[in-house]
Amino acid sequence: MRSPDFPIAIIGAGFAGIGTAIQLKKAGILSFTIFERASEIGGTWRDNTYPGCACDVPSQVYSFSFEPNPNWSRGFSEAPEIQQYLLDCVEKHKLRPHLRLDTAIREARFDEAEGIWTLTTDCGETVTARVVISGVGGLVDPSLPDIKGIQSFTGELFHTARWEHEIDLTGKNVAVIGTGASAVQVVPAIAPEVNKLTVFQRTAAWVMPKGDRVIPEKVKARFRRFPWLQRWVRSLMFAFSEFLGFFIILHSPLSKLPERVSLKHLKQSVPDPGTRAKLRPKFEFGCKRMLISDDYWSTFARDNVELVTDSIEEIRADGIETGDGTQHPVDSIILATGFAVGLAAAPFPIAGKNGLSLNDAWSKGAVAYKGMTVSGFPNWFIIMGPNTGPGHTSVLVYTEAQIHYILQAVKKIIGDDLKYVDVKQRVQDTYNEGIQGRMKYTSWSAGGCNSWYLSEDGSNHALFPGLASEYVMRARRFVPSEYHLVK
Ligand code: N01
């Protein structure tokens, strides 16, 4: 398909943006530009460089189905290898000429009469696009905890997603605050090199064994020789994760099974009953994101590692004071405190039809049709938008489904020479009533925990309350009658 006068703006050069660009190119649509605020592509895998950073979903599934990599070195690849995979995708598909790095989009405004989006960059430049595809990600900006006295700390303090590589932790007394998906990777990685590691846990989380292995050369050779074999392995792994979805997503007695597996892992990893009791979660499996690690819990059996469960009262110049009055002197504090979740609000001011702001449209919570389109914001497509996150499998399964859907919409707009497509409000409302209606049956809402999945009012606008295959089925076809098609 030729598209010389049809500028498309992709915002963000992570998995979503790169995958979209590859598929646009494959469809012969070359008139796209990828705007990326950082100096390199990669998103999560560019920003997260902390020791131990790796994928907690098997690499066979955590990669594009249309760009298989037979050379993954491990079952769960480490961050540099995933970043290299994305860089290789960019080179292979010659995407560099389409990239505008160091260019943040600060504002977007839709001109209904012309059917054109005007984007303003951080330099004040304006660019126009007929279609905007937003792939900015939801877990991007570090969440810095508002702990009393944090500014007064005189040692080194940094967030896992902004790792300070020039700081040598060898032989130091180090604190890690937080015990989520980032912490379970960084804690075992740094424990052997520091003098003392104190881990501050607010909520104990469920951890499953990872079973990570080096992939032998002969397996890689077979994947290279028989691509169908790798596709088959991928399908098997995906099917298994979907099976696990029943135990993770639903608020039901089924969650007892993974809890039993996890408790066995805890018992095998931590000999001391006192420490085990502190590490044992008090909420239903799946309610918070399940953590996967072979060596996180066993790290607490080390002599130089202490688990602190008393709440943090204050950070002082030379350490951390907990609610029981204990002083924990430390040289360095690592914040493994997660991200300011960007799913509930527009990433920057976005004005759609009649100047309607996306934040106003989302004042009662972020909603979109199938997580991708918002009524009143024509030709604006979101990848990994509201209610499209998984709690049990690879996010890329959803991303690929969305890319496929958006491509159909773009082809429709170009093919029928439409000014724009705008999802019907009724269609969007009906879809979201269904999604929200199912939330009460999920472990995320009823599992007795608080997590980044939930908004302040307890509603869930982050995750899809079903299996990935259901989402893929529902997003497989762009249905024109669900949209206002304007010539
Ligand atoms: O962040 P989190 P994360 N005082 O929000 C604690 C993805 N990811 O960076 O549980 C004390 O999970 C907080 O405590 P609590 C993945 O989607 C993927 O670890 O709220 N503690 C919690 O323990 C994941 O879900 C990979 O009580 C405070 C921790 O900090 C998401 O990123 C790897 C606190 C934050 O945990 C986020 O994971 C890593 C305070 N004031 C991450 N504030 C992959 O491998 C927060 N905490 C793909």
Image (cartoon, grey):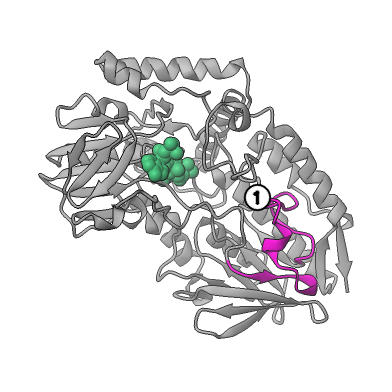
Magenta residues, start to end:
348-377
Is residue 102 in sight in this rendering?
A: yes
Question: Is-magenta flag for residue 353?
Answer: yes
Say which element carries label 1.
Answer: loop
Query: Where ligand 1 lies, by quadrant?
Result: top left
Q: Position of residue 268 (x, y in %)?
A: 30, 16
* Residue at left offset 40%, top offset 17%: 263
* Residue at left offset 33%, top offset 32%: 213
Q: Is residue 71 left or right of residue 5?
A: left
The relative height of residue 425 versus residue 31 in the rendered view (above or below) is above
**In which quadrant will I find the N terminus?**
bottom right
- Residue toward you, 239 or 450: 450
Q: Residue furthest front?
A: 325
The relative height of residue 26 versus residue 68 in the rendered view (above or below) is below
Q: Main secondary structure of the magenta part?
A: loop
Q: Which residue is mark 1?
A: 386
